[in-house]
Structures are given as C-alpha cells and as structure tokens.
Amino acid sequence: MTDRDLRIGELDIGSRPALIVVDLSLGFSSPESPLGGDFSQVIKANVKLVEQFRRHNWPIFFSTVVYHDEKKASVFRQRLPDLNILQANSKWVEIHPDMGLTSTDTLIEKQWPSAFFDTPLNQMLQQAHVDSLVITGLTTSGCVRATAVDGLQHNYPVFLPREACGDRNNSAHHASLHDIHAKYGTVMSLDELLQQL
C-alpha cells in the first residue's frame, strides 16, 4: 500500500479568530527545565502573533499545566514523571515573560494535554463569539496536537503557523504538523497567516 492522504478542503479563518498559545510556560520553554529546550525562535514567532491579535482586539488564551495535588492526572504524571515540576506557585508554570501577559489575556490552567479537556475554554470561546482558532506553542506532538484535534472536535476551523510551534523531537514536530494538516486543521507559514489576519 502506498502513502496517501485524503483530499482536503479549504477552511476560512473567519472574522473573529482566537489565539490559543499552548504551554509557553517556563516549564516547557526554558532550556533549564527537564521538559524544555531552546525554543527562542518559537517565542519570537508567538510575540509577533500576540502583537497582531492585540492590535485587532481579538481574544488571546494562554494555557499552562499546573498541578495542585498528587491525584490530578496521576497516570499521565506516572508516564511522564518530569511533569511533577509543574507545581502551583512554581516558576515553571509561569508564562514566558516575552509574551507580556496582560489583564485582557485569559490564562487557562490544565492538567492534561489538551487545553480543552476539563477546562472552561470552549465556553469562553463561545462567550467571546469566536469563529476560528489559531493554535501555537509547545509541544507540537503533544499538547499542541491534542488542542488542535479538540478544536476541530468543537467544530472550529483550526490554523497552525509552523514557526510558532515547537517540539523537543524534530521528527515528531514535522510528522505532527503533517498529520494535523492532513486531517484536523490548516498548517501554514507564519507570514501566510499574518497576511490572512
């Protein structure tokens, strides 16, 4: 059997997109963290996107993984024990300072990969009359992918600028972007997305 993707249709970015920046916390974005790496270019790309969304007064959501007790997501944490550094009030759960978090941004605490799972994100998107999603952040093969799939499952057109997503595993990064574009959303360059916005 040969490699073959399904035929795909074009999606409209809509008139009121929301930006969901997944887990651009120090725990994932800092090279000093066991969960992190050198994501300086990903951070720069996200700064550009955040500035664009703020100029348009479009909603911006940041997610961060935070654990308040030992029971929450215990199986996930047993599988990936380095997640245990993401304790409430630790520096690792703070959003990277280059994002310039403001009072108009929304911070979503989560415990599992998707920013939708067991959080009020979808309700907030509906209240903000959002009609499409731009999803970025860390890591492409994990929490970004899970959030993109859930975005589609909540019936939003999903867009991912490839330079604004990153992964510790480069092969997994590219394979995940391919898979997302083939089935769940539209992957494009940052410049293409900024032009559409």
Image (tube, rainbow, N blue to C red):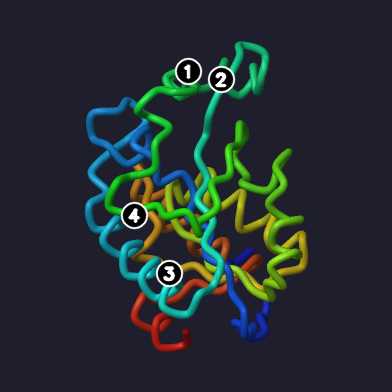
In what quadrant of the picture does the N terminus appear? Answer: bottom right
In primary-sequence order, the first of circles 1 and 2 is 2
* Cβ atoms at labels 3 and 2 below 8 Å apart: no
Look at label 3 and name its amino acid: Pro
In the rendered image, residue 100, in percent from the top left (x then y), is placed at 33, 54
In primary-sequence order, the first of circles 3 and 1 is 1
Q: Which residue is mark 3?
A: 161
Q: Circle 3: is it few (<14), some (14-19), or many (20+) Cα within 10 Å?
A: many
* Cβ atoms at labels 1 and 2 below 8 Å apart: yes
In primary-sequence order, the first of circles 3 and 2 is 2
Q: Which residue is mark 4?
A: 99
Depth-wise, is mark 4 or mark 3 nearer the camera?
Answer: 4
Q: Circle 2: is it few (<14), some (14-19), or many (20+) Cα within 10 Å?
A: some
Quarter-of-image position of residue 133: bottom right
* Cβ atoms at labels 1 and 4 below 8 Å apart: no
Depth-wise, is mark 3 or mark 1 nearer the camera?
Answer: 1
In primary-sequence order, the first of circles 2 and 4 is 2
Marks 3/1: CA–CA distance: 29 Å
* Cβ atoms at labels 3 and 1 below 8 Å apart: no
In the rendered image, residue 189, in percent from the top left (x then y), is placed at 38, 76
Depth-wise, is mark 1 or mark 4 nearer the camera?
Answer: 4
Residue 185 to residue 144: above or below: below
Q: Mark 2: which secondary structure?
A: helix
Q: Which residue is mark 2?
A: 77
* Cβ atoms at labels 4 and 3 below 8 Å apart: no
Left or right placement of residue 109 versus residue 128 in this view = left
Marks 3/2: CA–CA distance: 29 Å
Q: Which residue is mark 1?
A: 84
Quarter-of-image position of residue 59: bottom right
Look at label 4 and name its amino acid: Met
Residue 21 has which mark?
Answer: none
